[in-house]
Image (tube, rainbow, N blue to C red):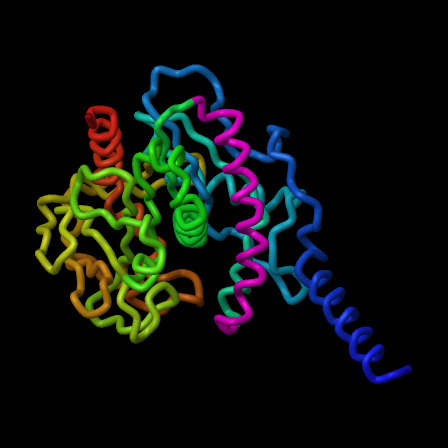
Amino acid sequence: MPVVKRSKFLFLIVSICLSLSLTACAGSRQISYSDAKNWAYFENEKSEKTADVFFICPTVFSGDENSFNMAMDDETTRGYFLGATNMEKGIYDDNARFFAPYYRQAGLNVYRLPVAEREQYLSFAYSDIKNAFSYYLTNCNDERPFILAGFSQGADLCIRLMKDYTGDRDFTAKLVACYAIGWSITQDEVDSCPGLKCAKGESDTGVIISYNSEAEYVDSSLMIPKGTRTLAINPLNWATDETPADKSLNLGACFTDYGGKITNEIPFLTGAYIDARRGALVVTDVSAEDYPPVLDIFQEGVFHLYDYQFFYRNLEKNVGTRIDAFVNED
């Protein structure tokens, strides 16, 4: 075989193998979001609630050496998926209809890979989210204000949606806010996509609300690698600088189960301030021993799993505040 043909043949084989590796467990077909079984929540009925929430679930799929994206027919993981969604759903329930698609999310094992190797699996997950969001906009939105919301991987995918839609005037006109909690967004990202805006206070709209909870001594994490500075806002005083918020401002930390029930509520659990160097949200009144990281991809002092729970009631109140501000804009 001539060298040129052999090279093309080998390139074709490598491309096919890569494609198979991405989709072997998750399936390669496009998901039909007209099918209700592909939604954890699909509250597409008339409602007196002012807005909608499009929520993206955090990572619940573990993965293994042969599986890097969740399969849509994995009933066990779908149960975890619904449970993890329920844990945050109550924050938004008073004010909005709730839409949460199942998607072929990247597994926890993806985050153990080198950074350069993760993107193929995250991009695959995002393709489902973009498809589901497009279906929601076309078939369900009906000119209603909406919130994008997610946690962890879900927050990452929210930010990707923001980047893709930032030039869409219809999207911008209806976006109340994007709660992208538990993931980082940097100044370079904002500068490269001028339509992105990070929240500056408690009631601005069309903005991204983001933070990552840590102990004071943490100097690197999966969400904020060493040398990175993320943009953040403090959910207690809605400051974007180092101004400390006392725990008296914490309306209630709420710890929820997989049914969404609040099993323990602790008012005034912790204060917080934003670290000027890393942009992390430093929580001041809890110990790493009492709130361990649980997953081995996080080290002690990274309070990632508690990002929503530590500030539950403040977030719940803020959702209503931002919706009211949006509705009352001239």
User: Residue 158's spot in the image, x, y percent?
Assistant: 41, 47
Q: In the orientation shown, which residue stands out farthest toward the bottom? A: 3
Whether residue 269 sits left or right of residue 65 in the image: it is left
**Residue occupying image coordinates x 28% and y 41%:** 254
**Residue occupying image coordinates x 18% and y 48%:** 200
Quarter of the rendering occupied by the N terminus? bottom right
Rendering quarter of residue 132: top right
Whether residue 215 sits left or right of residue 36 in the image: it is left
**Residue occupying image coordinates x 44% and y 15%:** 46
Q: Main secondary structure of the magenta part?
A: helix
Q: Measured along the vertical axis of the image, is residue 246 above or below residue 131?
A: below
User: Residue 222's spot in the image, x, y percent?
Assistant: 39, 67
Q: In the orientation shown, which residue stands out farthest toward the right? A: 1
Q: Measured along the vertical axis of the image, is residue 284 above or below residue 35?
A: below
Inspect the magenta stretch and tell me whether residue 129 lies in it.
yes
Front-most of residues 47 and 250: 47
Q: How many marks?
A: 0
Q: Which residues are magenta?
A: 114-142
User: Residue 118's spot in the image, x, y percent?
Assistant: 53, 66
Front-most of residues 269 and 329: 329
**Res. 90 visible in picture:** no
**Res. 38 visible in picture:** yes
**Residue occupying image coordinates x 70% and y 50%:** 27
